[in-house]
Image (cartoon, rainbow, N blue to C red):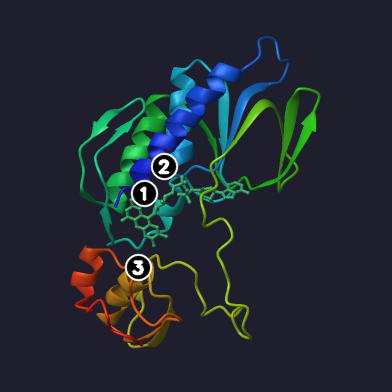
Amino acid sequence: MGLIKNSVEQGKHAADEIKKSIEKNHGATYDLVIVGAGPAGISASVQAKLNGLNAVILEQDSLGGTVFNFPRAKVVMTNPMDLPGHGKVKLFETSKTELLTLWKDVIHKHNIDVREQSRVEGISKKDHNFVVTTHDGEQYHTHKVLLAIGRRGTPRKLDVPGEQMEKVAYRLLEPELIQGKNVLVVGGGDSAIESAILLAQSNKVTLSYRSEKFSRLKPKMRAASRMPSKRSC
Ligand SMILES: Cc1cc2nc3c(=O)[nH]c(=O)nc-3n(C[C@H](O)[C@H](O)[C@H](O)COP(=O)(O)OP(=O)(O)OC[C@H]3O[C@@H](n4cnc5c(N)ncnc54)[C@H](O)[C@@H]3O)c2cc1C
């Protein structure tokens, strides 16, 4: 699975392209505001620094992006990647903790300006620049904006009665704290199966999936679940 690697590479490329299009004497406080501190935003921020840009990252949650929300014991599958400001990361299987430590080290080493708990709620054009506004009214005057907001910024909801209740969750941080419960996992992709396997160790788990087959599973996840490719539900 190379999604984290892809994000890192795309963040780097974006920062390189932005560097080429920066106008001299643009007059804004920042060259670049990066929205989102996941693998893509982190990589872009370090590459921007290496390219001599004055950048800041605004993150609505915590450094790490989706990786920060992985279950603690999750095995993270990845491909070796070239992390700007760090070099080759030769990992195929790693952990959430190891990855977060890596991000934090590289951010610290390059003195990157990260503002956590800063949700971007507005971006408006002002002459040749932009004004980025966060939920608490802070404004950032910048020449360029890079959206590295991933796909989890607004989780897709089921639109069914009751889904706003506290017991309905869109991320699984500490499955080991959930025990002896009846749990319904909705979905049939890798994330759903992985969550179901983790929860099934101490709970009664039911999986609800709208498709006839679990056809989207990666081979490794299929093997872990011992699910035949043609099983229907
Ligand atoms: C359960 C699960 C398991 C996965 N397992 C793996 C795996 O094993 N290996 C692998 O390679 N990939 C895996 N992935 C995919 C991988 O996590 C993503 O591809 C990767 O994190 C994408 O990086 P990104 O930086 O583009 O986005 P993200 O990591 O999603 O980061 C985007 C950031 O933007 C922030 N943001 C969004 N909107 C705003 C806003 N308005 N203001 C400020 N900040 C904002 C979000 O809070 C988030 O921190 C998994 C994904 C999930 C959901």
In percent of the image, x 55 and y 17: which residue is there? 20
Q: Secondary structure at mark 2?
A: helix
Q: Secondary structure at mark 3?
A: loop
State left or right for residue 150 relative to residue 85: right
Q: Categorize mark 2 by other alpha carbons within 10 Å: few (<14), some (14-19), many (20+).
A: many
In percent of the image, x 44 and y 53: which residue is there? 66
Tag 1: amino acid? Leu
Distance from Cα at disc 1 to Cα at disc 3: 15 Å
Judging by the rendered image, the residue that carries numbered circle 2 is 7
Choose top left, top right, bottom left or bottom right for residue 146: top right
Q: Categorize mark 3 by other alpha carbons within 10 Å: few (<14), some (14-19), many (20+).
A: few
In percent of the image, x 41 and y 42: which residue is there? 7
Q: Secondary structure at mark 1?
A: helix
Query: Do the numbered discs 1 and 2 sit on residues whose CB atoms are within 8 Å?
Result: yes
Q: Nearest the camera: 43 or 202?
A: 43
Name above or below for residue 2 compared with residue 184: above
Judging by the rendered image, the residue that carries numbered circle 1 is 3
Ligand 1 within 8 angstroms of badge 1 C-beta? yes
Q: Nearest the camera: 26 or 30?
A: 26
Judging by the rendered image, the residue that carries numbered circle 3 is 216
